[in-house]
């Protein structure tokens, strides 16, 4: 089988299970680091003719990361396109099984079992442990996690309540003074898509604890899910003003 993945998370998932299936991936597909396949530009601007030339049996996409006109062009060329929707942890596990087992015909990978066990065995946070947070994903302009996001669901299981989970938009643009006025207990700053660092982000929220977290562990749905509870939990506990 020949597979092209247009989603970094799913590229890593397929590569960790049966790397020989992949013949193409986006320039953003950074894991595994030694992945040697044809690069077909980005998630939002894939090189459709290059993908067609690869003659894949399947193209894996995501309703949030990829554009429908590109997927329609691939379908028009007679290529099967599987579009995933992942906004909760349960959806992530279900879609990973759909992609790997049902679409690619693979045995269920052990890493998926380990990932499900890691989250299933995670103790539920007590009410005293829950912290209210804003979760910026971009600045200039400031954008934060809003409603129905995979990352928001992940954080909720770790005792972090997203203050903008009820916003009408999934990724609303909120001025930084409004973010501060929301009086969060914590600011969660991932290193992707915007690369927040100790010197770029926390200074906008003086006096508030800031947690610098791995964007891959917060937003990717693949093998990283197995270690995400421990990695993210440690970063959240280490948050400091």
Image (cartoon, helix red, strand yellow):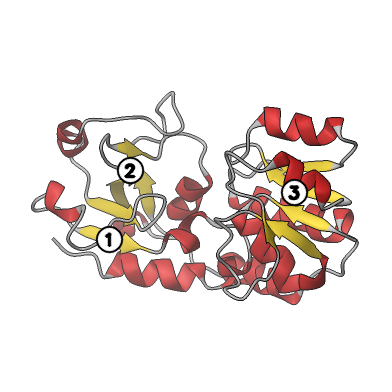
Return the disc, 1 or 3, that comes first in the chain's sequence. 3
**Which type of secondary structure does the marked residue at label 2 adopt?**
strand
Label at residue 138: 2
Label 3–label 2 contact, CB within 8 A? no
Q: Looking at the image, which residue is at 60% across and 72% down?
A: 32
Q: Looking at the image, which residue is at 77% across and 29% down?
A: 72
Q: Quadrant of the N terminus?
A: bottom right
Between 224 and 45, the residue placed more toward the observer is 45
Label at residue 121: none
Q: Looking at the image, which residue is at 61% across and 65% down?
A: 120
View extreme (top): residue: 168
**Residue 98 x %, y %:** 81, 53
**Which type of secondary structure does the marked residue at label 1 adopt?**
strand
Q: Quadrant of the C terminus?
A: bottom left
Q: Which residue is mark 3?
A: 60
Left or right side of 213 for 32? right
């Amino acid at each position: 089988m020949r597979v092209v993945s247009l989603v970094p998370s799913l590229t890593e998932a397929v590569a960790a299970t049966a790397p020989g299936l992949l013949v193409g991936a986006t320039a953003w597909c950074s894991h595994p680091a030694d992945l040697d396949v044809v690069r077909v530009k980005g998630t939002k601007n894939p090189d459709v003719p290059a993908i067609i030339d690869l003659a894949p049996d399947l193209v894996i996409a995501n309703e949030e990361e990829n554009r429908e006109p590109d997927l329609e062009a691939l379908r028009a060329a007679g290529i099967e396109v599987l579009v995933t929707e992942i906004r909760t942890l349960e959806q992530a596990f279900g879609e990973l099984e759909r992609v790997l087992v049902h679409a690619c015909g693979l045995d269920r990978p052990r890493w998926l079992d380990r990932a499900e066990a890691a989250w299933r065995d995670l103790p539920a946070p007590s009410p005293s442990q829950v912290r209210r947070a804003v979760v910026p994903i971009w600045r200039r302009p400031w954008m934060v996690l809003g409603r129905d996001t995979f990352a928001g669901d992940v954080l909720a299981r770790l005792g972090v309540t997203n203050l903008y989970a009820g916003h009408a938009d999934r990724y609303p643009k909120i001025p930084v003074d409004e973010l501060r006025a929301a009086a969060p207990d914590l600011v969660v700053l991932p290193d992707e898509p915007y690369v927040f660092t100790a010197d770029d982000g926390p200074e906008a929220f003086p006096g508030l604890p800031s947690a610098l977290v791995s964007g891959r562990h917060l937003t990717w749905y693949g093998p990283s899910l197995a270690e995400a509870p421990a990695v993210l939990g440690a970063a959240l506990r280490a948050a400091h003003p």
